Amino acid sequence: MPAVPSCLLEPLWNQFAALLPARGEFVTDHPLGCHRRRIADRTVFEHIVLALVHGSGYERISTPGCSDRTIRRRVKEWSDQGISEQIHALALKAYDRMVGLGLYEISVDGCITKAPSGGEKAGRSPVDRGKQGLKRSVASDACGVPLGIVSAGANRNDSPLLGPTLQAARAQVGPLPEMVNVNLDRGYDSAKTRALIAELGFTAEIARKGVPAPIQWMNGYGKLRRCTEKRGSVVDFYLYLAAALITLRMLIRRATSRYRWDGRPTTRRLK
């Protein structure tokens, strides 16, 4: 059973494959000079999506045709190339062209998850007895489409991450409108936040104490709930790959009532 429906996997892979560098059928730089056949990128990509959705270790999802070492090597290669960030940017452009991004209302919020293996982006979690944890700061538009993501240690405060998060959103969608209202929770209520908002020329609505935080949709992915990756670039690779899947799912869900195309899903519920 596939980790995600084919209506999500196929368009994501088509764009992903278009960004990959051209490689031969055989590995030419083998240390022993062997002509070993290269594992197909599509096969490795499906294993990576499986790891993202279920959060399983590479040893558990490996198959006779794709070892855990192959998955690790390919993830490192693709994360260094920034493929997932480019895929997310393409998904945002498609969403903006077909539906329209709500950039006049932007919400920014942080979420702490587990990082039991530590790593470059991990830190002592204040909500998990000081164990290693990961914080992600996500900016989303008025409808909840993820725009930009910043990862940091769990011990980082939300307020210092606001500026980098808005910069990440600007890098993915381009210049933001002149009048933007930024919605924040109580954790961002500081003089530094207000000074940054004033410097950018935006307005801000900071929730009062006791107001619940927005739902963290990205917690539906097992790899993000319990991240065992140590390299910071790999952590960001999975974060933006999840954001691309979320953006694509929301695009298909909203486009079904506006457009018609071959292979259009018959249900609005896409898992």
Image (spheres, grey):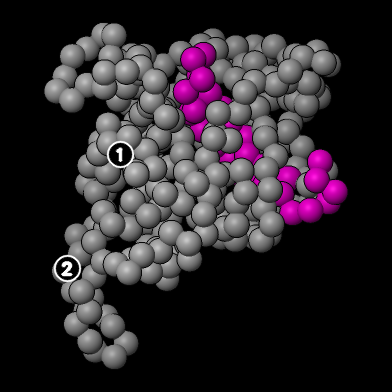
Where does label 2 land, which residue?
24
Give whichever of discs 1 and 2 has the lower sequence position: 1
Question: Which region is colored magenta?
Answer: 127-154
Apparent side of residue 100 relative to residue 22 in the rendered image (left or right): right
The mark closer to the camera, 1 or 2, is: 1
What's the magenta bit mostly, secondary-structure-wise? Answer: strand
Q: How many marks?
A: 2
Give coordinates of residue 88: x percent, y percent: 39, 36
Where does label 1 land, which residue?
9
Task: Give the quarter of the figure containing the N terminus.
Answer: top left
Residue flagged by tag 1: what amino acid is it? Leu
Q: Would you place residue 212 above or below residue 36 in this image?
A: above
Q: Would residue 75 be visible to someone looking at this image?
A: yes
Question: Does the segment drawn in magenta span residue 136?
Answer: yes
Apparent side of residue 40 relative to residue 243 in the rendered image (left or right): left
Question: Does the segment drawn in magenta span residue 186?
Answer: no
Q: Nearer the viewer, residue 125 or 182?
A: 125
Give coordinates of residue 139: x percent, y percent: 56, 27
Q: Nearer the viewer, residue 149 or 265?
A: 265
Q: Quadrant of residue 40?
A: bottom left
Q: Nearer the viewer, residue 12 or 84?
A: 12
Residue flagged by tag 2: what amino acid is it? Gly
* Mark 2 crowd level (few <14, some 14–19, many ≥20, 10 Å Cα): few
Give coordinates of residue 71: x percent, y percent: 40, 63
At 78% from the left and 26% from the top, the residue drawn is 187
